[in-house]
Amino acid sequence: MGHTMLDLSGYIKFLVGMFALVNPVGILPVFISMTNYQSPAARDKTNLTANLSVAIILWCSLFLGDTILRTFGISIDSFRIAGGILIVTIAMSMISGKLGEDKQNKQEKTETAIRDNVGVVPLALPLMAGPGAISSTIVWSTRYNSWLDYLGFFVAIALFSFCCWLLFRAAPLLVRLLGQTGINVITRIMGLLLMSLGIEFIVTGVKASFPGLLS
C-alpha cells in the first residue's frame, strides 16, 4: 500500500534497461541466420510470432512471474541453466550448417510448424525474453506494484516489442546486402557466439545454484 509510484522517467529507465538486457541489434544477425531459408512472408510471420511471444512472456512475468516461480519452486537460476542448454543445442546446428536444411525438405504442414517454433523458441525464449529480461521485469513489478505502475510497465513492454518488430523488418535488406555466402558465414560465427552465450548462461546458473562448486 505504501509503495512509491513511478513517474515517466522510471518507465523510460525500465524500457532502456530492457533494450540493454535484450540487445535486439545483436540478435538481428541470429534472426537473419535462422530465417534465411524462409520466404519473405514466412520471415514476416516469424518476426511477428517472435515479438508477440516476447510481449506475452514479459506481460506474464509482469503480472504472474513471481507467483508462478514460487508455485512451482523454480528459481531464475534453474531457468537460466535450461535456457543455456537450449541455446547450446541450437548453436551446434548453426555451426554445422544444419539449421533449416532439413526443414526445407519436409511437408508444408510440418515446415509451417517449425517456422512458428523458431519464432517462439529460441528467438522469443530464451534469446529475447530470457532470464535477464524476465527477472528484471519481476523485480520491477514487485518493487512498484500499483495498478498504475502495472499499466506503465505493460505499455513499455508493448513499445519494446514493437520497436524490435520494426528492427527485424529490416532483415530482408540485410539479406540482400550480404548474399547467401555472407549469411552462411554469419550463421557459423553467430553459432559460435551463441554457444559461448549458452555456456555463460549455464555457468552463471550453476554458480548461483551451487555457490561452492566453481569457486
Image (tube, grey):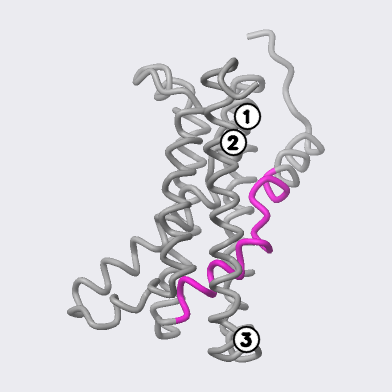
Asked whether the residues under the numbered discs 1 and 2 touch, taking CB atoms below 8 Å apart as contact, a structural biologist would say: yes
The secondary element bearing badge 1 is classed as helix
Does residue 26 belong to the magenta stretch? yes
- The N terminus - image quarter: top right
What residue sits right under mark 2 in the picture? 151
Residue 52 position within the rendered picture, expressed as x and y whole percent measured from the top left: 46, 56
Does residue 127 belong to the magenta stretch? no
Residue at image location 17% in from the left, 79% down from the top: 107
Give the mark nearest the N terminus, 1 or 3. Answer: 1
Residue 23 position within the rendered picture, expressed as x and y whole percent measured from the top left: 68, 54
What residue sits right under mark 1 in the picture? 148
Give the mark nearest the N terminus, 3 or 2. Answer: 2
The secondary element bearing badge 3 is classed as helix
Q: Which residues are magenta?
A: 18-36
Q: Quadrant of residue 40?
A: bottom left
Kindly report the distance in space between the C-alpha atoms of the residues bearing marks 3 and 2.
35 Å
Q: Look at label 1 and name its amino acid.
A: Leu
Q: Look at label 3 and name its amino acid.
A: Leu
